[in-house]
Amino acid sequence: MYKLNEIKDFVYLTFPIFDEYDDLFHCFTTRKGGVSKGEFES
């Protein structure tokens, strides 16, 4: 699965399966706050 990481207000996901690759840096972020509303709604 994934690991949830947090540095102050910055939250990001990493996947421990990739830790064995020294030349690979990865992370995934999501938008904090839920679903967009109004003109930004999809």
Image: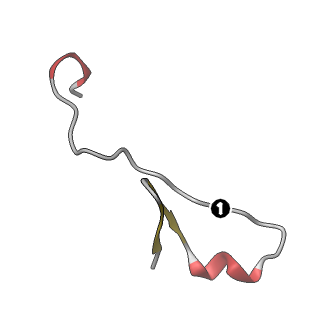
> The residue under label 1 is which amino acid type?
His
Residue at mark 1? 26
- Give the residue furthest to the right: 23
Decide: is 20 above or below 13: below
Q: Is residue 20 left or right of residue 26?
A: right
Q: Which residue is pictured at 21% across the width and 26% down the height?
A: 41
Q: Which residue is pictured at 26% across the width and 22% down the height?
A: 40
Q: Which residue is pictured at 58% across the width and 60% down the height?
A: 27
Q: Is residue 10 left or right of residue 21?
A: left
Locate residue 23, reporting x and y percent.
84, 68
- Label 1: few (<14), some (14–19) or many (≥20) C-alpha neighbours in 10 Å: few
Q: Is residue 23 left or right of residue 16?
A: right
Q: Which residue is pictured at 61% across the width and 81% down the height?
A: 17
Decide: is 23 above or below 36: below
Quarter holding the N terminus is bottom left
Decide: is 3 above or below 39: below
**Secondary structure at numbered mark 1:** loop
Locate residue 30, reporting x and y percent.
40, 50
Decide: is 27 above or below 14: above
Quadrant of the rendered image containing residue 36? top left
Quarter holding the C terminus is top left
Locate residue 6, reporting x and y percent.
46, 65
